[in-house]
Image (cartoon, rainbow, N blue to C red):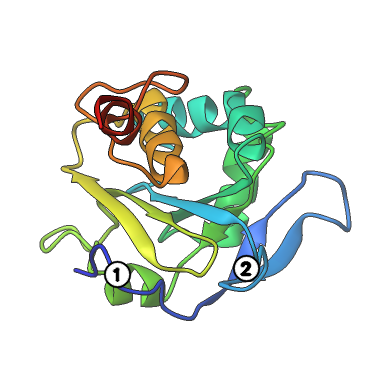
């Protein structure tokens, strides 16, 4: 599995970006959102139970990520047509504001090392990469437990301070760097 300090590998995937006829799909690659932080999150399968709760929550929090100059990219090993059908039929996914990428050949999932060994689908992996594409955070859950989008935002906030942040630090609180400077 790629980890902190590694670079997000090159990819070019078809993404579902809209339900509007003729504008549904777009090619997305590692340079599509150059100069932005990237939050790349994987889910195992479309048309399942836990996955839409996570995807919908990322969608609800899209503005929070935009405010932090971060682009959300959701990925699974389903095709763009399955993603489109799911968005069309699931009320919480219809107006999704970020691309759903189709890693049907499992190239990105394999390159990042997030394929489940038995199931062959992506684990619930989350990567935060800085504007240069360097991975700053990785977390991976087994298939049965969803992630916490608020924690992804908190972690992004901490990295964007470029300072020492203690346990449970929240945006707006003093960092350890600030406290050390005051004490010195």
Where is residue 101? Give x, y as percent. 55, 59
- Does 67 sit above or below residue 106? above
Viewer-side label of 2, 1: 1
* Marked residue nearer the N-terminal end (2 or 1): 2
Residue 184 placement, left or right of 79: left
Asked if disc 2 and disc 1 are in contact, CB closer than 8 Å, the reply is no
Residue 90 seen anywhere in this rendered image of the structure: no
Where is residue 182? Give x, y as percent. 32, 26
Of the 4 image quadrants, the one containing the N terminus is: bottom left
Where is residue 36? Give x, y as percent. 61, 57
Where is residue 128? Give x, y as percent. 40, 52
In the depicted view, which residue is nearer to us: 13 or 22? 13
- Does 158 sit above or below residue 115? above
Q: CA distance from mark 2 to mark 1?
A: 18 Å
Please give the label number shown on residue 14. 2
Dividing the picture into quarters, in which one does residue 131 lie? bottom right
- Does 87 sit above or below residue 127? above
In the image, farthest residue toward the bottom: 10
In the image, farthest residue toward the front: 184
Please give the label number shown on residue 112. 1
Residue 137 seen anywhere in this rendered image of the structure: yes
Dividing the picture into quarters, in which one does residue 109 lie? bottom left
Classify mark 2: residues with Cα within 10 Å, few (<14), some (14-19) or many (20+): some
In the depicted view, which residue is nearer to us: 48 or 70? 70
């Amino acid at each position: 599995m790629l980890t902190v300090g590694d670079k997000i590998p090159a990819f070019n995937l078809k993404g579902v970006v809209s339900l509007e006829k003729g504008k549904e799909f777009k090619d997305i690659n590692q340079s599509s959102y150059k100069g932005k932080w990237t939050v790349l999150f994987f889910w195992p399968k479309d048309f399942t139970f836990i996955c839409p709760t996570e995807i919908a929550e990322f969608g609800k929090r899209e503005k929070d990520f935009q405010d932090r100059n971060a682009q959300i990219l959701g990925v699974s090993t389903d095709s763009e047509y399955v993603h489109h059908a799911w968005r069309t039929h699931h009320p919480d996914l219809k107006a999704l504001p970020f691309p759903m990428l189709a890693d049907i050949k499992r190239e990105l999932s394999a390159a990042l090392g997030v394929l489940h060994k038995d199931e062959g689908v992506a684990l619930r992996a989350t990567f935060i990469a800085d504007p240069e594409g360097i991975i700053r955070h990785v977390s991976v859950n087994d298939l049965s437990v969803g992630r916490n989008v608020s924690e992804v935002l908190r972690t992004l906030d901490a990295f964007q301070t470029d300072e020492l942040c203690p346990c449970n630090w929240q945006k707006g609180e003093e960092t350890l760097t600030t406290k050390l400077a005051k004490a010195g």
